Amino acid sequence: MTRNLNLLPALLLLASLNAFGQAASSCVQTLRHAQSTYENGRLHELPDMLKGCLSSGFNTEERRQAYKLLVQSYIYLEEPEKADEAMLSLLSTDHFFRPNEDVDPAEFVSLYNRFRTKPLFRFGVTMGPSINAPFSLLDYSIGSGSDGSAKYKPQVTFFGGLAFEKDFFNDRLTVAPEIVFAVKSHRENSFAFLGDENAAVEVNGDTLRPTTSEVETVVKVKWIEFNPLVKWWLSKNPASRDGKIEPYVIGGPGINFVTKATLETPKLNHIRGEGANTGAPVTITDCYKPVNFSAIVGAGFRWRLGAIYIVPDVRFHIGLSNIIDGANRTIDEAVFEYGWIADDYRINSVTLNIGIQYAVFKPTKLIK
């Protein structure tokens, strides 16, 4: 008896799977029968024939085919309200459905064109790597008796944020604002010099005049970007839903809000002295203007994968002005511990943006 009880759940599961398989097979046959009934002109039989499987039994593709048969049947039976209802059900089942104008009846295509079938908007995430390259505007030194020079090396960082898109002007222009958290960093080697400029010393393969110190550090700036961008679609029909690649160009301003800046693992080398000084990161947020601006241009494409859009592009972020606050360029800890002072510079970046978007639809009849 105990063994029989242990087998009961398995038997019930097997019976359920068998019943489900029979129901699915039955609905496949029902759809085939409905197609044959439609072709034979017995249109009034279709609603009752398909009702049960539309409630439960059809998969998404089968539901799409069934609703399409119903729309065409109601059109020919001259029942416009039921045709509208069936078309709404079709578009709700498959948001990316498009009629084939070369095959589908003209009346069906005409009814489809009276509905709003395009997405209301799209939203998603954007992320990727960024290569950041400072452009030096003016070098500064820590003392009146010396001057300095700095060398910058780009670094790769990463960013991530949220994106929104809304189409206008027959879908050729898209408003595409973004909010992104980004890290901009670069490696900096700063040299301080004293003495006769005709004297020379070899430093890292370069011939320089007498050098007192070298600061090695990574400057890391964290900020929030608000990018009110626009896209111009290069394809004739950017709202196409057939999975083709849809190229675009993108551009607009970037508004950057600095949240934190640090010198990462700063190191002071006393070239004309003894020893070196290294330490923990130093906060230098006050050196930076809280709001900075850039210009953004780029190009990319969109590709639909099921219900998701994959949207990669490459962009150039061009810094428009000096991002250093001249009145606060000196940070005591950075100056006294490492001999570092902020130089004026603007920052340029190249980003590879990978967007993943989801479209929001609300099909409705627009033309009575």
Image: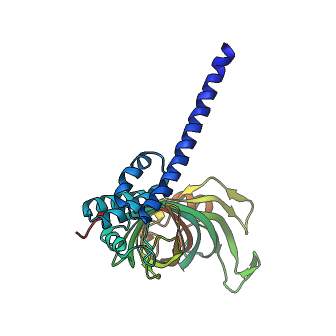
User: How does the figure colour the protein chain or chains?
Assistant: rainbow
Image quadrant in which the C terminus is located:
bottom left
The residue under the point 48% across, 78% down is: 248
Q: Front-most of 136 and 92? A: 92
In this rendering, is residue 178 above or below 56? below
Horizontal and vertical percent position of residue 273:
73, 65
Labels in figure, total: 0
Q: Front-most of 318 and 18? A: 18
Residue 183 visible in this rendered orientation of the protein = no
Q: Front-most of 102 and 266? A: 102
Image quadrant in which the N terminus is located:
top right
The residue under the point 42% across, 77% down is: 101
Residue 313 visible in this rendered orientation of the protein = yes
Residue 147 sits in which quadrant? Answer: bottom right
Horizontal and vertical percent position of residue 51:
39, 49
Residue 254 sits in which quadrant? Answer: bottom left
Horizontal and vertical percent position of residue 108:
36, 70
The residue under the point 30% across, 70% down is: 114
